[in-house]
Image (spheres, grey):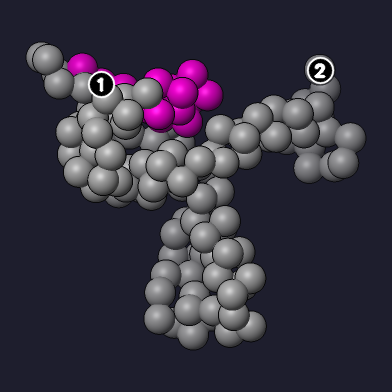
């Protein structure tokens, strides 16, 4: 593979199908909420369950899928498991999706008025 193709953002990029898989993995409200909850650092399954208002078992299933997709990483400490985002891209992708959703509801969304974080603040 040529180095110039590694981060190709063209329509014929070899990463398009993988990008679609990432979108598919994030096409679930609970998983988006988990990513949002993890944007500031690692949390335990129970803490995440409280934040997203789901059972720990349900959150664990979502986290397992996010781990397989390499969106989150796990750290074991005794009997507890703590999760964190694998990198900043999932956080940015979800933030941009939220900002895009705001645009679908308003011609002057909150992130343009300064009422909420802007896409630049999230980076």
Q: Which mark is residue 1?
A: 2
Q: SS class of the residue under badge 1?
A: strand
Q: Measured along the vertical axis of the image, is residue 20 above or below residue 101? A: above
Residue 18, quarter of the rendered image: top right
User: Which residue is at a point 59% across and 75% down the rendered structure image?
Assistant: 105
Q: Are marks 1 and 2 in contact (CB under 8 Å)?
A: no
Mark 2, other Cα within 10 Å: few <14 / some 14–19 / many ≥20: few
Expressed as whole percent of the image width and height from the top left, the position of residue 19 reads: 68, 34
Task: Report whether 18 appears left or right of 93.
Answer: right
| Residue sitting at x 20%, y 43% | 50
* Segment colored magenta: 62-76
CA gap, disc 1 to disc 2? 33 Å
Please identify the quadrant where the N terminus is shown: top right
Of the residues under marks 1 and 2, which one precedes in the sequence?
Answer: 2
Task: Tell which residue pokes out farthest to the left in this image.
Answer: 78
- Mark 1 Cα-neighbour bin, 10 Å: few <14, some 14–19, many ≥20: few
Up-down: is 113 above or below 56? Answer: below
Magenta span includes 29: no
Of 77 and 49, the residue lying toward us: 49
**Residue 36 spot, x, y in % from top left:** 38, 49
Which residue matches tag 1?
75
Q: Which mark is residue 20?
A: none
Circle 2 SS class: loop
Q: Residue at coordinates 83% horizontally, 33% vertically from top-left?
A: 13
Can you see residue 13?
yes
Residue 25 at x, y percent in the picture: 56, 33
Residue 17 spot, x, y in % from top left: 75, 29
6 or 12, nearer to the observer: 12
Q: Is 64 part of what is drawn in magenta? A: yes
């Amino acid at each position: 593979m040529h180095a110039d193709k590694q981060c190709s953002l063209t329509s014929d990029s070899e990463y398009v199908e993988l990008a679609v898989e990432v979108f598919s993995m994030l096409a679930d409200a609970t998983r988006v909420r988990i990513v949002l909850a993890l944007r500031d650092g690692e949390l335990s399954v129970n803490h995440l369950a409280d934040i997203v208002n789901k059972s720990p078992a349900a959150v664990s299933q979502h986290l397992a899928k996010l781990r397989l997709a390499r969106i989150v990483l796990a750290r074991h400490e005794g009997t507890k498991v703590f999760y964190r985002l694998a990198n900043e891209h999932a956080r940015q992708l979800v933030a941009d999706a939220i900002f895009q959703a705001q645009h679908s509801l308003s011609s002057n969304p909150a992130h343009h008025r300064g009422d909420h974080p802007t896409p630049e603040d999230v980076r």
